[in-house]
Image (cartoon, grey):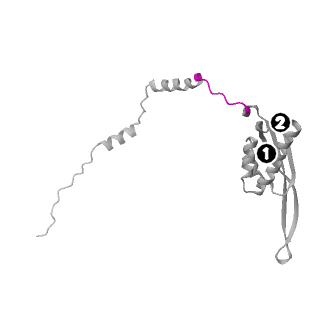
Amino acid sequence: MEVKSIYKNARISAFKCREVTREIQGLPVMEALDVVKFCPKKAARLVGKTLKSAVANAENNNSLRLQNLVVKEAVVGEGRTMKRFRPKARGSAGRILKRSSHIRIVLTEDETLAQPKKKSSPKKAAKPAASKAKKETEPKKPAKADKKTEAKAEKKAEPKTETKPDATPDSKE
């Protein structure tokens, strides 16, 4: 069952508020409340209010347990923008946009949180080990070498012996 709560015309820009809602999306409600509580932003306070309202709606209206709730959606949309003007140099005016937003949080009841997770069966764990053993038994194929790379390897393998020509004295005696 889905439970939602909407905070309309929150006096914060949607861009700033989305930072916080991205953090809590998909978390269990208890963890989401902790994240919001310890986040030092104005948006966290507003999102926290909406989240608590959604939890209260779930408990009172639908008789859902707090431990089973998960944040399914945390969406922030743009609200109205108030336009104000500030005087600027030479008689002009600068436009100021005071943005607002609508915060919507949807909670769902998740049955898997109440039940402990089951361990995987040993058959599934044995399959990767078998394929690993198969890979080890296969012979490795030698890499094909080009004629150019073979010639380079031979040049490197040969010792470099440099012969100096005999020095002939150019003396004028």
Q: Is 122 covered by the magenta stretch?
A: yes
**Amino acid bearing label 1:** Ala
Compared with residue 112, is residue 57 higher up or lower down, i.e. above or below?
Answer: below
Q: Say if mark 2 contacts mark 1, CB within 8 Å.
A: no
Task: Indicate left or right for 117 with 125 as reference.
Answer: right
Q: How many marks?
A: 2
Numbered label attached to residue 64: 2
Label 1 sits on residue: 74
Q: Give the residue displayed 84% in from the left and 62% down from the top.
A: 97
Say which element carries label 2: loop
Residue 42: % across, % down? 77, 57
Magenta stretch mostly in which secondary structure? loop
> What span is colored magenta in the figure?
114-123
- Extreme residue toward the left, this view: 173
Q: Quadrant of residue 124?
A: top right
Q: Give the residue displayed 76% in from the left and 31% down from the top.
A: 111
* Quadrant of the drawing holding the N terminus: top right
Q: Give the residue displayed 13% in from the left and 69% down from the top.
A: 172
Badge 2 local density, few (<14 within 10 Å), some, or many (20+)? some
Q: Estimate the spatial distance between the alpha carbons at disc 2 and disc 1, rounded to whole Å.
A: 19 Å
Residue 107: % across, % down? 81, 40
Q: Nearer the viewer, residue 13 or 61?
A: 61
Q: Which label sits in the foreground, 2 or 1? A: 2
Task: Indicate left or right for 42 with 80 as reference.
Answer: left
Numbered label attached to residue 12: none
